[in-house]
Amino acid sequence: MKSESVQRFITCAALALGLAAANPAAAADITGAGATFPYPIYSKWAEAYRTKTGVGLNYQSIGSGGGIKQILAKTVDFGASDAPLEPAQLEKDGLVQFPMVMGGVVPVYNLDGIKAGGVRLSGAVLADIYLGKITKWNAPAIAALNKGVKLPEQDITVVARSDGSGTTFIFTHYLSKVSSEWKEKAGNNTSVKWPAGVSGKGNEGVAAYVQRLSGSIGYVEYAYALQNKMSYALLQNKDGNFVGPDDKSFRAAAANAQWDKAPGFYLLLTDQPGKESWPITGATFILMHKKQDKPENAAIALKFFDWAYESGDKMALDLDYVPMPDSVVKLVKAEWKKIQDPAGKPVAF
């Protein structure tokens, strides 16, 4: 059940995308649904693009699972997912997939007197918290990583996502890499059976719980942590260094990504090497049908994505996302040739 603050956020989000009833024509220009992870940048891009072109965007921030369902049902022009679909599934469903932007998932906490970056966690300790094995903030495993920090003798309330979510996919992919017990008991998916805690819908639902519950820990997309002034933990990366989330550590994690060797752009960026790498980094993806029943709609959507690649990098960086490298954008635009009208002609401009 959503709190009043969450409901206000959703209402404001709709207005930010230009969905006001006073302008119904703009609302029908481009339709998309899915991941909450990229919502802040899609909102920013949509506002700027509408100012420039008059073309509006109706994007429903409903979670990656919902986005996949809607694109398969052909109720939207594009779906959005932080969990990339495997090449075999793309082929089976007749879809094209491409990465739009990269960012990070961050553990956030609510502890009186401890500011952002004031708590250090390792992947193994984070997994044990979510497994329900570590239940107190002053537990020896946490205290050992935080010498000199006055940790409270307080119960930990674990907060997770209740909906099918690419943010959850990235988070549990990381936990499965750093904890064999997590991999065996909970695994990696857009939705898992959480061993402990409470759950909220969307990044906004998790953020609302963590902000309200003292002693809680959750995970959200980094822009949500910043916008909501939430305290985030430093994480120990694969090289053993404790790092904070920002565009520099996201870029470090993405530095060795080999997109050209990833069929269907199926690539995950968790627990990457590098002394500055943020361990829970991931891309967010767009899904579109290869054969378009409404090719004119697909063409309008691709023009928006083209504009975002060419003109949206600064806006992305301002929100601490990592733009796709030019070499990847070139690969993506080549992939767009597979998106065709009923006669087999590419719809891309």
Image: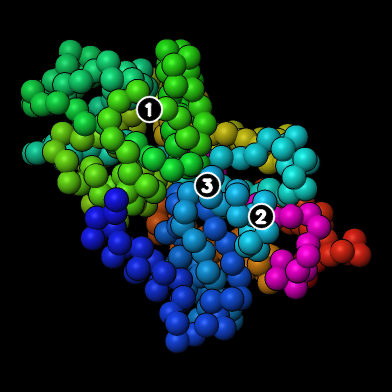
Crowd around label 1: few <14 · some 14–19 · many ≥20 (10 Å): some
Q: Closer to the observer: label 3 or label 2?
A: 2
- Residue visible at 55% across and 80% down in the picture: 26
Distance from the alpha carbon under mark 3 to that under mark 2: 14 Å
Q: Is residue 218 above or below residue 56?
A: above
Q: Earlier in the sequence, mark 2 or mark 1?
A: 2
Q: What residue type is labelled 2?
A: Ala
- Label 3 SS: helix
- Residue 206 x, y percent position in the rendering: 31, 44
Observer-nearest residue: 44 or 330? 44
- Residue visible at 39% across and 74% down in the picture: 15
Distance from the alpha carbon under mark 2 to that under mark 1: 29 Å
Observer-nearest residue: 122 or 55? 55
On residue 64, the disc is: 3
Observer-nearest residue: 15 or 253? 15
Q: Quadrant of the C terminus?
A: bottom right
Residue holding disc 1: 194
Q: Closer to the observer: label 2 or label 1?
A: 2
- Label 2 SS: loop
User: Magenta residues, as a range?
Assistant: 281-299
Crowd around label 3: few <14 · some 14–19 · many ≥20 (10 Å): many
Residue holding disc 2: 73
Distance from the alpha carbon under mark 3 to that under mark 1: 18 Å
Q: Which amino acid does label 3 sit on?
A: Ser
Q: Which of marks 3 and 1 is nearer the N terminus?
A: 3
Q: Is residue 300 above or below residue 61?
A: below
- Residue 238 x, y percent position in the rendering: 44, 22
Left or right: residue 80 versus residue 335 is left
Q: What residue type is labelled 1?
A: Trp
Q: Which of marks 3 and 2 is nearer the N terminus?
A: 3
